Amino acid sequence: METPLKTVSAIIPVFNGEATVAAAIDSALAQEFDGEVEVIVVNDGSTDATSGVLEAYRGRVTVLDRVNGGPAVARNAGVRAARG
């Protein structure tokens, strides 16, 4: 009997992280797992160029855009959207 594949969700909350968010996403996407790795990035109302950086990842990661509510609220939004 085969074990069903599992999904692991990596949730990345970001606020004004244009300089670092790409490295965080690339690191999450590079993880190896015997199942699916789902990457969810929650843009917590960034006012810098974070949105432009995230645009390059649309289709490979889930991007949630929301008004700024702080890291805990952003992380919880990502958890609610997660499948893993």
Image (cartoon, grey):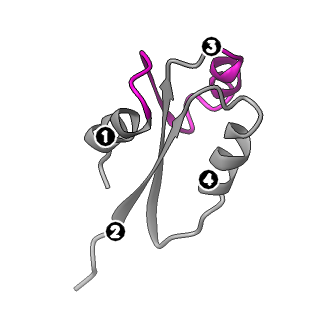
Judging by the rendered image, the residue that carries numbered circle 4 is 29
Q: Earlier in the sequence, mark 1 or mark 4?
A: 4
Give the numbered dot on residue 47: 3
Q: Amino acid at mark 4?
A: Leu
Q: Earlier in the sequence, mark 4 or mark 2?
A: 2
Whether residue 63 appears in magenta in the rendering, the answer is yes
| Secondary structure state at the residue bearing disc 4 | helix
| Secondary structure state at the residue bearing disc 3 | loop
| Secondary structure state at the residue bearing disc 2 | loop
Separation of marks 2 and 3 at Cα, in angstroms: 38 Å
- What are the residue bounds of the magenta stretch? 47-70
Identity of the residue furthest to the right in this view = 19
Q: Residue at x 34, y 33 (%)?
A: 73
Taking 41 as reference, is 67 left or right? left
Q: Within 10 angstroms of label 1, few (less than 14), some, or many (20 or more) residues?
A: some
Q: Residue at x 58, y 19 (%)?
A: 46
Taking 72 as reference, is 46 left or right? right
Q: Earlier in the sequence, mark 4 or mark 3?
A: 4
**Residue 27: % across, % down:** 67, 55
Separation of marks 4 and 3 at Cα, in angstroms: 25 Å
Q: Nearer the viewer, mark 1 or mark 4?
A: 1
Image quarter in which the N terminus is found:
bottom left
In this rendering, the answer to whether 51 lies above or below 29 is above
Q: Amino acid at mark 2?
A: Leu
Judging by the rendered image, the residue that carries numbered circle 1 is 76
Q: Amino acid at mark 1?
A: Asn
Judging by the rendered image, the residue that carries numbered circle 2 is 5
Image quarter in which the C terminus is found:
bottom left
Identity of the residue furthest to the front in this view = 70
**Residue 68: % across, % down:** 44, 20
The quadrant in which residue 51 appears is top right
The quadrant in which residue 28 appears is bottom right
